[in-house]
Image: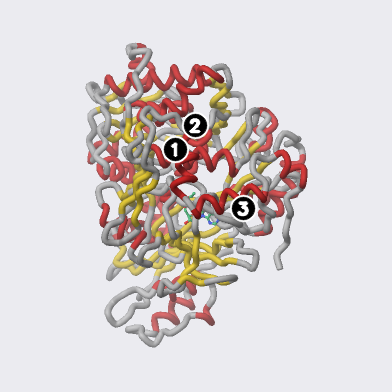
Amino acid sequence: MSEVYPVPDAVASAALIDNARYLEMYEASVNDPEAFWGEHGKRLDWIKPYSKVKNTSYDPHNVDIKWFEDGTLNVAANCVDRHIATRGDQVAIIWEGDDPSEHLEITYKELGQHVNTMAGVLRNAGVKKGDRVTLYLPMIPEAAYAMLACARLGAVHSIVFGGFSPNSLAQRISGCDSKVVITADEGLRGGRKVPLKANVDKAVETAPVDAVVVVKRTGGDIAMQDGRDIWYHEAAANAPDFIEPEEMNAEDPLFILYTSGSTGQPKGVLHTTGGYLTYASMTHQYVFDYQDGDVYWCTADVGWVTGHSYIVYGPLANGATTLMFEGVPTYPSPSRFWDVVDKHKVSIFYTAPTAIRSLMGAGEEHVKKTSRSTLRILGSVGEPINPEAWNWYYNVVGEGRCPIVDTWWQTETGGILITPLPGATALKPGSATRPFFGVQPALVDAEGQILDGATEGNLVILNSWPGQMRTVYGDHERFVQTYFSTYKGMYFTGDGCRRDEDGYYWITGRVDDVINVSGHRMGTAEVESALVAHPKVSEAAVVGYPHDLKGQGIYVYVTLMEGEDPSDDLRKELVKWVRQEIGPIASPDLIQFAPGLPKTRSGKIMRRILRKIAEDSFDNLGDTSTLADPSVVTDLIDNRQNKS
Ligand code: WTA
């Protein structure tokens, strides 16, 4: 039996939603989604109100998802303009620089000016409704301005995390045929410079664009190409003061975000306008119990979905004060997070288990020397949080005062699907607990039979919610194949999950070939295709293995070309190669040279065996009799790499 932390009475009575209210609203949301979402869609300002609410089909012959389909609105108007009259002087964004001496407070009024200026610069650069714009930016306020400026113009942004290589950036620029890239001269993280513009220069050699807009961040030395590259501060001086927000249909695209799947290259997850914003805003309010006066901080990067929904769109739609942090948790010291909490009086704090684990390793003295008295809610996202990290977060960081919302969701889901609500849900360390309003999770066996009661299975969702992705950009068939064909009529999440006797959900991790390294999602197939592109590599297989800090580490099996010899130097060369091909986040942790990989007689690599070896569970290899050459397994076991 796991520990249970009941909701303290004081928390329940001060919160927006208590348990009785949760149960009532949840029931209403699944009994009559049309009525429920028809009501909650009104949290947004619509130019033309919708008359239709839900029109969704999970039938694999006709997957089609539409919410509020005849309504029109503009996302930037909802996140900025509508707040100016009521809270123009309230701080919208607190920006905390990498260096603790730098910070900014941007009010809603100022945010409005910046977004209009950025929109004007983009319009002058030729950006129109429907065009794609790639953002490759550090965590500076201009990243939020650029997202909202695209939304204002009806252009579709695609953000590429600054840790991706020029090669990965190029794929993502050409993948959605972006017209313009917005970047900075350099990024700054943990005191180190990130050569963003130089990376863009390389990327656009193979993925040409009409214009590159460059924000000056460090003032570092970069090349500017005449006729293509535009300094943002210069262009801003000539931009109009006001750009009319474009009237968008609820189902017009808002953004594309590339994410890794179990096969092939990353796919462009497409989110649209009305449903996405309704869902991001509603989850932000209720999951974090956001109330006026709160200072809310999500430590994610805008390059990931968490940054989209819970730094920018959800909070700003709610007129919240959202903190944006440029740096890293350990710079200049492992107290940084808590120093920032004290400095800006943060009351709601949302981070990833990998950050918690690394700070836990640095020692609690770094926490204890700070006050943290303003904190009231803590959140976790991105991977399962192990009970040890949960307890440390709860007791040391939160001093036993602050509920932890362990939020399960995905790039595809647009917003949080399974989570406690602070005033409603008794907590169990390591469990994401119960579904949010409108979400109907189920567990199925390998044949797709729905399992009842306390059990374990594959996690599916039975009915659509407004924040759901609509398609894979440019490849609807891949969307259908990936999510709706494994179990007919259901959305398949790719996650395994257990449900306990109280109906609580416990995510057990991916059941496909996606791995989760320090909260960064990665496809093993991508790392493999980078490796086999190296001239000395003949074959490669990549699996995840349990890693104390990262959650999962990257374990690589490599077969070399005839005549090539394994060596530590070659290991280093391969690590460097993968960093160049994909980016530092894909650096292999362990590389094992293997003369042969376990394959079936039809030549398929048996990853199950490779996973077990990487996990050190040798007694558990399962049936190896179908292998073409069972002796390779002995060699793999004898030469497995050490994880200390
Ligand atoms: C994992 C991040 C356990 C899960 C928002 C999912 C989690 C993948 C949790 C999506 C959690 C996310 N507990 N696992 N609270 N949150 N995951 O698309 O495997 O980057 O499928 O979205 O992260 O990762 P993505």
Q: Which residue is drawn at 41% across and 84% down?
A: 624
Contact check, label 3 and label 2, Cβ < 8 Å = no
Assign a secondary structure to mark 3: helix
Crowding at mark 1 (Cα within 10 Å: few <14, some 14-19, many 20+): many
Q: Mark 1 touching mark 3, by CB under 8 A? A: no
Q: Which of 222 and 231 is in front in this view?
A: 231
Q: Which of label 1 and label 3 is nearer to you?
A: 3
Residue 627, relative to residue 74: is it above or below? below
- Left or right, 81 with reference to 321: left
Query: Where, by quadrant of the figure, is residue 484 drawn?
Result: bottom left
Distance of mark 1 from mark 3, alpha carbons? 24 Å
Looking at the picture, tell me which residue is in the foreground, 505 or 462: 462
Q: Do the residues labelled 1 and 2 touch (CB within 8 Å)?
A: yes
Residue 199 showing in the rendered view: no
Mark 3 / mark 2, whichever is N-terminal: 3
Would you say 75 lies left or right of 132 here?
right
Q: Mark 1 points at which residue?
A: 277
Secondary structure of residue under mark 1? helix
On residue 317, which mark appears? Answer: 2
Labels in figure, total: 3
Q: How far apart are marks 3 and 2 (CA)?
A: 25 Å
Q: Nearer the viewer, mark 3 or mark 2?
A: 3
Q: Position of residue 330 (x, y in %)?
A: 61, 41
User: Tag 2: Cα neighbours inside 10 Å, few (<14), some, or many (≥20)?
Assistant: many
| Type of the residue with mark 1 | Leu
Image quarter of the N terminus: bottom right
Rendered location of residue 142, percent (x, y): 44, 26
Instruction: Assess disc 3: are there few (<14), some (14-19) or many (≥20) residues with their C-alpha within 10 Å of its C-alpha.
Output: some
Task: Determine whether 37 is above or below 539 in the image.
Answer: above
Mark 3 — residue? 23
> In screen coordinates, is 90 left or right of 236?
right
